[in-house]
């Protein structure tokens, strides 16, 4: 029972962060039809910037218990880079997908140098700051209260995102654009503004996700690639362009990863991609994806 709770709690915590990044990836692909490899860089940038923001805030006298608010705010502020990058992406919107992949991969390499320039090559941490909120105990299992707060924050963001897409007028315009871009433009939708706002929202989800995870793990230059590997597993399992798929895929990847770390840590990635292969064989479009015609 103790081992089960360890896997369950660890898996749901990782899934909650992974969902934020995967949701941004799904949103950008669904509306803009761009597979954004740079989502991993936004995640890493959010983590590094979050460390700097928290250390600066604590040095300025902000009480340590409020650091989670500082992290979320730093992730939101960092989303300001989204419109700038979207401007560059406009040059490849109507070109072959290979150009889009190459350009977003170029951003991964450039951001890696940016991280090395500002924060150096050594991993950065926030020490044991995540323990500022204490622990939650369930039977013989204890885990940081901070993890529960992150899970709750991710659930809140998922619900808000679902409400925004389903219940608001702008959300309906986004969904209409995702279904038929040319028709939406013909009916008066400002596609250029939609692209900028969607990419910024996708960037925000990535930077907030990176900022929230950093109190529990070190920020390193390997983060972008490691995150992209898992985020794409989520997308393949859940189905490209499906927000529901992002949620279920993140949960599956998070739980499989937590189980693999507990049993066979060396096979962490292999275990995830075995699930990916099974899903690809059984449902090539993913659990909630639509077949590409």
Image (tube, grey):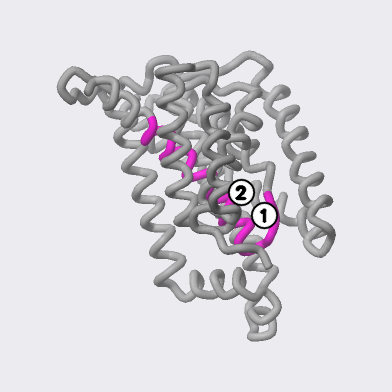
Residue labelled with disc 2 = 80
Q: Quadrant of residue 176?
A: bottom right
10 Å crowding of disc 1: few (<14), some (14-19), many (20+):
some
Q: Position of residue 229 (x, y in %)?
A: 62, 35
Q: Secondary structure at mark 1?
A: helix
Q: Are marks 2 and 1 in contact (CB under 8 Å)?
A: yes
What residue do we see at 63% from left, 57% from top?
Answer: 29
What residue do we see at 50% from left, 74% from top?
Answer: 172
Q: Position of residue 111 (x, y in %)?
A: 72, 34
Q: Quadrant of residue 262?
A: top left
Q: Is residue 120 magenta?
A: no
Q: Secondary structure at mark 2?
A: loop
What residue do we see at 42% from left, 41% from top?
Answer: 251
Please tell me whether residue 158 is drawn above or below residue 275 in the rendered image.
Answer: below
Q: Quadrant of the C terminus?
A: bottom right
What residue do we see at 34% from left, 32% from top?
Answer: 66
Please tell me whether residue 210 is drawn above or below residue 281 in the rendered image.
Answer: above
Residue labelled with disc 1 = 83
Q: Position of residue 76 (x, y in %)?
A: 51, 46
Left/right placement of residue 127 relative to residue 45 reads left
Left/right placement of residue 66 relative to residue 216 reads left
Q: Which residues are magenta?
A: 11-35
Q: Quadrant of residue 241?
A: bottom right
Q: Residue furthest front?
A: 282
Residue 147 versus residue 12: which sits nearer the camera? 12
Residue 6 versus residue 73: which sits nearer the camera? 6
Left/right placement of residue 71 relative to residue 182 reads left
Q: Quadrant of the N terminus?
A: top left
* Mark 2–mark 1 distance (CA, rounded to whole Å): 7 Å
Residue 241 versus residue 49: which sits nearer the camera? 241
Please tell me whether residue 226 is drawn above or below residue 142 in the rendered image.
Answer: below
């Amino acid at each position: 029972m103790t081992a089960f709770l360890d896997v369950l709690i660890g898996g749901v915590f990782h899934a909650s962060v992974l969902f934020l990044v995967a949701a941004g990836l799904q949103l950008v692909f669904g509306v803009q039809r761009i597979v954004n490899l740079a989502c991993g860089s936004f995640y890493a940038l959010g983590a590094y910037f979050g460390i700097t923001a928290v250390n600066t805030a604590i040095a300025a006298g902000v009480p340590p218990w409020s650091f989670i608010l500082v992290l979320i705010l730093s992730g939101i502020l960092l989303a300001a880079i989204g419109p700038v990058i979207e401007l560059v992406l406009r040059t490849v919107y109507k070109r072959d997908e290979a150009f889009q992949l190459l350009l977003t991969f170029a951003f991964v390499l450039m951001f890696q140098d940016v991280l090395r320039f500002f924060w150096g090559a050594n991993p950065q941490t926030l020490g044991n700051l995540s323990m500022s909120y204490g622990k939650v105990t369930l039977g013989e299992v204890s885990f940081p209260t901070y993890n529960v707060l992150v899970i709750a924050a991710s659930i809140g963001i998922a619900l808000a995102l679902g409400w925004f897409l389903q219940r608001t007028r702008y959300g309906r315009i986004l969904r209409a654009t995702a279904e038929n871009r040319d028709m939406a433009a013909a009916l008066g939708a400002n596609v250029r503004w939609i692209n900028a706002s969607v990419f910024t929202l996708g960037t925000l989800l990535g930077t907030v996700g990176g900022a929230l995870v950093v109190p529990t793990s070190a920020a390193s230059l390997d983060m972008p690639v490691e995150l992209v590997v898992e985020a794409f597993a989520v997308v393949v399992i859940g189905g490209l362009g499906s927000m529901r798929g992002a949620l279920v895929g993140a949960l599956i990847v998070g739980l499989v990863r937590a189980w693999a770390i507990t049993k066979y840590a060396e096979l962490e990635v292999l275990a995830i991609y075995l699930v990916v292969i099974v899903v690809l064989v059984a449902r090539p479009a993913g659990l909630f994806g639509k077949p590409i015609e």
